[in-house]
Amino acid sequence: MSDYEWWQERCDGMGISQSLKVKLLHREQSPFQLVEIYDHEDFGRLLVLDGYIQASQADEFIYHEMGMHVPLLGRERKDANVLIIGGGDGGNLREALVHDFVKSVTMVEIDERVIRLSEEYLGVNGDYNDPRVNLVIDDAKKFVSNAKERDEKFDVIILDLTEPVGPSAVLFTEAFFTDLVEIVSDTGVVVDSDSVFLTLHGGGFLQEQSGDGENLVSVMLKTRLLPHMEAYRANVPLYPGGDFGFYLYSKDGVSLRHPVMDHQGKHYDADVHQASFALPKWQRDWLDR
């Protein structure tokens, strides 16, 4: 353990952080953000962007399975088109490709270095050479605007973003969401997610603490650009607070809480799918604000 030193995750807003005894494997400043790879003896390798843990080899599958399989399997889908915004570690791509009914997966990541370093050090990514995959190295705001002009539609859109402190900051806005809703199919869904906290003042999001006071949930509750929202949750140990929320936005309001087919992951299955929608009363009240 001589090469391992105590490291503290970036602390913003709420005055809390977590400390891990890790060894630095790689650090570089990309054109967009600080990218770091650490090793922990029990949790494996960690991807850290601008001081925030994005994924660990030990528990990344919880986030990726719950974020992808719930919206894909919550209603009948055929020839589904999936859009992943961000997701440079490749875990969401991996889970989307599991299903034969997924016709295409477009992944838009602004920072190619995150993709390549995640491939090299974490190895949790899907197959970028799968013929269904369209990997786009570009700004997501520009991609979505162009997709709107092409009248392109997606059935599942996963917002797999960092906290709003780097290149993702421009995506946590009403302007971005206004364009995004134009590329959601009639039966489609947008999936957003964030760490959840309970304080003396009520519930809160990590994105609100690390950004400028809003996150995509608050934007959608205010604008109702997509009028229907459902929420579900999972515990992801290495995300701040451990309690992690997922938020589904749709046009038609069809509930996705009941899976239409079986799938067995390392974490996800039909029982976990349904149980994840059972929110505690304080979260229900908070989201009904």
Image (tube, grey):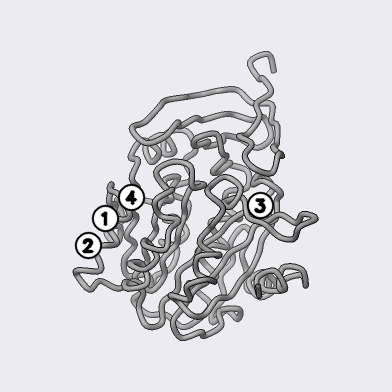
What's under tag 3, amino acid-wise? Val
Q: In what quadrant of the picture does the N terminus appear? A: top right
Label 2 – label 4 distance at C-alpha: 22 Å
What's under tag 1, amino acid-wise? Lys
Residue 88, x across and y down, in percent: 41, 46
Residue denoted by label 4: 128
Residue denoted by label 1: 142
Q: Earlier in the sequence, mark 4 or mark 3?
A: 4
Q: Is residue 138 left or right of residue 248?
A: left
Q: Is residue 123 left or right of residue 59?
A: left
Q: Nearer the viewer, residue 251 or 68?
A: 251
- Residue at image point 49% right, 73% down: 249
Label 1 sits on a secondary structure element that is helix
Q: Earlier in the sequence, mark 2 or mark 4?
A: 4
Q: Earlier in the sequence, mark 1 or mark 4?
A: 4
For marks 1 and 3, give the one nearer the viewer: 1
Marks 1 and 2: CB-CB under 8 Å?
yes
Label 3 sits on a secondary structure element that is loop
For marks 4 and 3, give the one nearer the viewer: 3
Residue 134, x across and y down, in percent: 27, 56
